[in-house]
Structure formats: C-alpha cells, structure tokens
Image: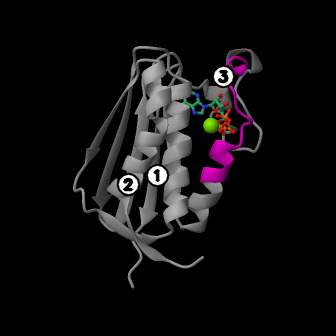
Amino acid sequence: KSLELVNIYEIFMEVYEMTDYFAKSKNINVSYKFSDQSISILSNRDYIKQIFLNLIDNAIKYTPENNNVYVEVYYDKNNLVIKVGDNGIGIPKEDINRIFERFYRVDKARSRDVGGTGLGLAIIKHIVKSLDGTINVKSELGQGSEFIITIPKKFP
Ligand code: ATP
Ligand code: MG
C-alpha cells in the first residue's frame, strides 16, 4: 500500500459526521480532543478511516442511551495514539482476548438486538498490524471500555 500524508483530524471529522445520526438517535455525546488539529501521519487514508469508523461505531453501539463516547488523539514520542472510549456495557474478562477474532461477538443474547457480524475489530487488528502498530483494550464490565491504538510515525 502506498503511503500518503494523512490529516487525522480531517478524517476523524468525516467519520464524526457519518456516525452523528447514530449517536444522536441514542442521545450519546461524542466528545473529542486532539493535541493539534494539524496532526498528520504518513499512512493510508482509508485505513485510518476504518479504524475510527469501527471503533466509534462499536462505542456507540455498546453504550446505553444518554451516555458518552470520547476520542483522543495525540503524539507520544514517534507514535500516533488514538483512544476511543465509552462508558457502556464493557467486556467480560473471559472474552477480552477473543474480541479481535473474526466473527467473535460477546454473548449472543446481549448482541442480538444490535446488528453486527463480529468483523470490525478483526479488520482493525489487521490494519493496525499492517501499519506496524498496536491495539490494546481496557474494559470494566458495566463501566465501559477504552481502545488504544498506536501507529508509528513513518519518515519519508
Ligand atoms: P461488526 O463490527 O462486524 O458490525 P461487531 O461490532 O459485533 O460487528 P466487532 O466490532 O469485531 O464486531 O466487536 C466484537 C465484539 O466485541 C462485539 O460483538 C462486542 O461484543 C464486543 N465489543 C466491541 N467493542 C465494544 C465496546 N466498545 N463495548 C463493549 N463491547 C464491545
Ligand atoms: Mg463492530
């Protein structure tokens, strides 16, 4: 995949608009904090967009009405850091290592009324790997989840 200079804020705003209707339908506020709106990285635009889209979609989907979702983006040394968090239903400890597998969904009963195939995180994991990055998750059942992605800055 060829690399291009990608403005992270710009892509996030596109995704923000794409997910706005969904968020509003549940009265979920999506807040965001960028260390710098001009933050850019040499990467692949579609990949970064997929990361935001899948994580924000999940955060809204697995969070009850009237709650909050947040996005944070900053640099840590030579890594771009993207955090997407929510105060939603959380992920049970016994499932946390499996959510990145294709088609894996935590407990069919709780996922039944929200659509999905269990592919979003598998796709993200694949993308992040191809960018030599990492993905981690912290979650507390009934409290919420936070996904943390780091992508190393590539130098031209
Ligand atoms: P798809 O993304 O294909 O529409 P999906 O959302 O079910 O379907 P993934 O995005 O791969 O699939 O997520 C896998 C599972 O991990 C979800 O079914 C859900 O059980 C759990 N999960 C993911 N994100 C969160 C979150 N923010 N809070 C709670 N559970 C989550
Ligand atoms: Mg998903």
Closer to the camera: disc 2 or disc 3? 3
Amino acid type, label 3 = Val
Q: Which mark is residue 81?
A: 2
Is residue 133 in view from this perspective? no
Q: Is mark 2 within 8 Å of ligand 1?
A: no
Q: Which mark is residue 114?
A: 3
Ligand 2 quarter of the rendering = top right
Give the CA separation, mark 1 to mark 3: 25 Å
Q: 137 or 8, which lies in front? A: 8
How many numbered marks are there? 3
| Mark earlier in primary sequence (2, 3) | 2
The segment highlighted magenta reads: 111-124
* Picture quadrant of residue 118: top right
Q: Is mark 3 within 8 Å of ligand 1?
A: yes
Instruction: Look at the image and say whether residue 63 sits in the magenta stretch.
Output: no
Residue at position x 54%, y 35% in the image: 57
Give the CA separation, mark 2 to mark 3: 28 Å
Give the residue furthest to the bottom.
156
